[in-house]
Amino acid sequence: MDYTGKQFAIFTLGCKLNFSESSEMAQLLEKEGLSRVDFKELADLYIIHSCSVTEQSDKKSRNIIRQAIRRNPKAMVIVAGCYAQLKPDAIAQIEGVDFILGTHEKYNLTSRLGDLSKNEYPQIFTSKPKEIKNFHKAYSFGDRTRSFLKVQDGCNYYCTYCTIPYARGISRNDTIENTVAEAKNIAAKGIKEVILTGVNIGDFGQSTNESFFDLVKALDEVEGIERFRISSIEPNLITDEIIEFVAQSKRFAPHFHIPLQSGSDDVLSLMKRRYKREVFAHRVEKIKLTMPHAFIGVDMIAGTNGETNEFFIDSYNFIRDLDVSQIHAFPYSERANTQALKIEGKVDVPVRKERCQQLINLSERKLRHFYQSQLGRECKALFEEQQNEGKMFGFTDNYVRVELPYNKELVNQVCQVRLEKVNEQNHVEVTVIPE
């Protein structure tokens, strides 16, 4: 089929993993001859790469789908991703959707295009979770500065509140050899920073009889990449040897994101998490002992079924007293077919939101405290192309958000800087130290 002159647009919702996969889908479409335009523009094909981690995610996915249909009622509309996998029938109720492609089927999207004509009714293509076994490589490259590299997919954990195993299938990955080759491809594009992404990246090696630690060691030898970041890793899977290696590595940043979800052992048990809070506390202590300036981000859920006020206070006090840098807090959202729905003690939605806000307020104080603790230090920062009101922005290796007056010559450059002042926007103003 000749798609010369035909244009497509992709809107990506959700996690870094989705962004890496959207880039892969875009490459498939470009190989067919279509050209990519911004989602706000008129296109012949719209792809909504959906998320379903919360009810709010479902709602946002539906809104974006309707936006595309209104923008060009004649365009083909494809909905892919986790919402498509979990709730295809709900999407099929939206008039104007042509294809609904689940987790496995989204990589076959080019076979559905035909002449880009509209379908009379939505066509649904999804697989059962146990049938989702293939690993599809992906990395993002739309940003000149950094890339999200997919190293793992799926999850064998069945936490009571989570639908990811149903949406993305079993844990799987490519070989270390092939993953390193992808990192080298990214380096060849001039990208300086790579963020390792996946559903449960610490579980890397399930399908290849390898380990995440071995992957980290191999990636540390990739020339051309200035820094790697570990996006998110379970407390029970970030071992002391990984922490010790990162502390002395050539390329891995002193930056960790560790999902805690609750600081109450009672709630962790209800969630069927695979650790006690003491394990989490040990990881934080170990990181700070070996890398005092390390940034530690944390995920927490407020108001899950069974979380009494006493359990929440216990959880809040636990994370308050830990030396972490930032908390990503979310109110609990009921998900169909999850075991959490069977747990007694439902928390009213306003209470969930109030508890979540308490955690957000705590996070803001912790982040500002961390930034202030870094003032006066000299470190390396990678600057982005993005600018706003004459300012440019970037991140230090330990994830301090920095800004300085825009200078085109510094875009995608790693510069030695001195951290000077935390401003009202909670960015750290810096000065560049000449080499």
Image: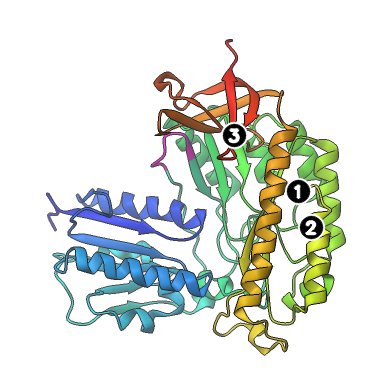
Circle 1: residue type: Val
Please tell me whether mark 2 sits on a helix, a strand or a loop. helix
Q: Give the position of the N terminus as an image quadrant.
A: bottom left
Q: In the figure, residue 123 lies in which quadrant?
A: bottom left
Circle 3: residue type: Asn
Over which residues does the magenta segment extend? Answer: 141-146
Name the residue beneath numbered marker 3.
423
Give neighbour class at mark 2: few <14, some 14-19, many 20+ (Cα, 10 Å).
Answer: many
Q: Which of marks 3 and 2 is in front?
A: 3
Is the Cβ of the residue at disc 1 closer than 8 Å to that at disc 2?
yes
- Where is residue 234 drawn, in percent x and y? 71, 58
Please give left or right for residue 200 compared with residue 2 in the image: right
Is the Cβ of the residue at disc 3 closer than 8 Å to that at disc 1?
no
Residue 427 - label:
none
Please tell me whether mark 3 sits on a helix, a strand or a loop. loop
* Label located before the other in sequence (3 or 1): 1
Q: Give the position of the C terminus as an image quadrant.
A: top right
**183 relative to 316, above or below:** above
* Label located before the other in sequence (3 or 2): 2
Name the residue beneath numbered marker 1.
324
Q: Please indicate, yes or no, whether residue 257 appears anywhere in the rendered image.
A: no
- Where is residue 230 drawn, in percent x and y? 64, 46
Please give left or right for residue 16 compared with residue 363 in the image: left
Q: Which of marks 3 and 1 is in front?
A: 3
Q: Tell me if residue 46 is in the magenta stretch.
A: no
* Label located before the other in sequence (1 or 2): 2
Please give left or right for residue 273 compared with residue 215 in the image: right
Circle 2: residue type: Ile
Q: Distance between the residues labelled 1 and 2?
A: 8 Å
Q: Which residue is drawn at 67% across and 36% down?
A: 398
Name the residue beneath numbered marker 2.
319
